Image (cartoon, rainbow, N blue to C red):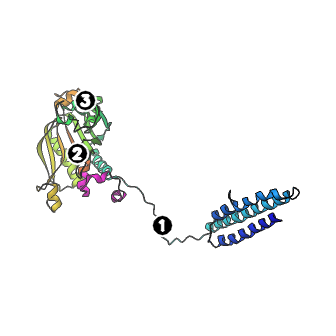
Amino acid sequence: MQIKEKINEIKNQFDSDFILLSSDEIDKNTISYKYLGRKGLLSTIYPLLSSCDNKDKPKVGKLINDLKTYINDRLSSVESSQNSSDFNKTIDVTLPENILSSGSIHPLTKIVDEIESIFQKIGFSSVYGSEIETDYYNFEALNIPKHHPARDMQDTFYTDYATLLRTHTSGSQIHHMENNTPPVRILSPGRVYRNEDISVRSYCLFHQIEGLYVDRNVTFSDLKSTLEYFAKEFFGSDIKTRFRPSYFPFTEPSAEMDVYWGLDNESDYRITKGTGWLEILGCGMVDPEVFKSVNYDTKIYSGFAFGLGIERIAMLKYGIDDIRLFYNGDIKFLRQFK
């Protein structure tokens, strides 16, 4: 009978392929698809049933099912054998381990954590605010008048006439003072935005950490001693510092703090403009107008504030010469800071 010959032919062909499977010359999935797939060899037998006598169809059907069972059983035996082999496989404990690559803390986060830790030792705590701020909290409450250049659309990202992406974290300090009475001793770290050209030294967003201390009889000497303590803790006990007069609308008097970076190489000359001194932060005594906006009695309370850019500090500490590296997501760059 033609159909029985076809069944035997397929069985013999399968046995030949099965030998190749045992020798790894062909994989199990390929054989399974070849014989049991929707267009496999087994499917070519079913159309031949129509040529059989009705009395022979049950016998032929059984032969086809037996062949299908035979193929499935042989393929299953291979899988069981492979699983058993894997289970009993001897492990060579002298081989090196497969080390999984772990993530790392971003260098900017490391700097923020270190600065917060330094100030926490002298009683400062951190407060956080929204990156979307109103014009009032970002400018007006901080004694920045409407004609100030910082309010220009070219410097600030406005979402509408009264809302913007904050240009500093000082607004968080205003929110905190509105809801807390002195003494106040806080840090306000976070991301800020400025409409600046992107280059090796500037970016449209960066990170700040600002500090505020308000209490009775706070003086400029308190400000200097606090920041000198920070500089020695962060840069080392032998670091030299100096204060230069400056101007900020929310502090009076105002100053900038420099550290002596040195002139040991060409890079030092370039970043310090040949002076050896490098500005790291701005500071000053809080202007009484700022206290009026939060209803603090200026006859009783005084305070100081300071702010520094995290990217600038990180670039100095790690010797990074391009601010864009912090935002590129380059794994090779970030792996250096584990």
**Magenta stretch mostly in which secondary structure?**
helix
Judged from the image, the secondary structure of the residue bearing numbered disc 2 is strand
Q: Nearer the viewer, mark 3 or mark 1?
A: 3
Furthest toward the front, the residue is: 51
For mark 2, what is the residue? 308
Residue identified by numbered label 1: 97
Amino acid residing under circle 1: Glu
- Image position, residue 110 (x, y; %): 32, 51
Residue matched to label 3: 136
Q: Is residue 187 magenta?
A: no
Viewer can see residue 134: yes
Tag 1 or tag 3, which sits nearer the N-term? 1
Residue extent of the magenta highlight: 313-338
Gap between marks 2 and 1, in whole Å?
44 Å
Q: Is residue 123 left or right of residue 45?
A: left
Q: Which percent across, then down, holds residue 230?
A: 22, 48
Nearer-N-terminus badge (2/1) = 1
**Measured Cα–Cα span from mark 3 to mark 1:** 58 Å
Quadrant of the rendered image containing residue 39: bottom right
Q: For residue 18, which quarter of the picture?
A: bottom right
Q: Is residue 101 left or right of residue 190?
A: right
Residue 261 in view: no
* Secondary structure of residue under mark 1: loop
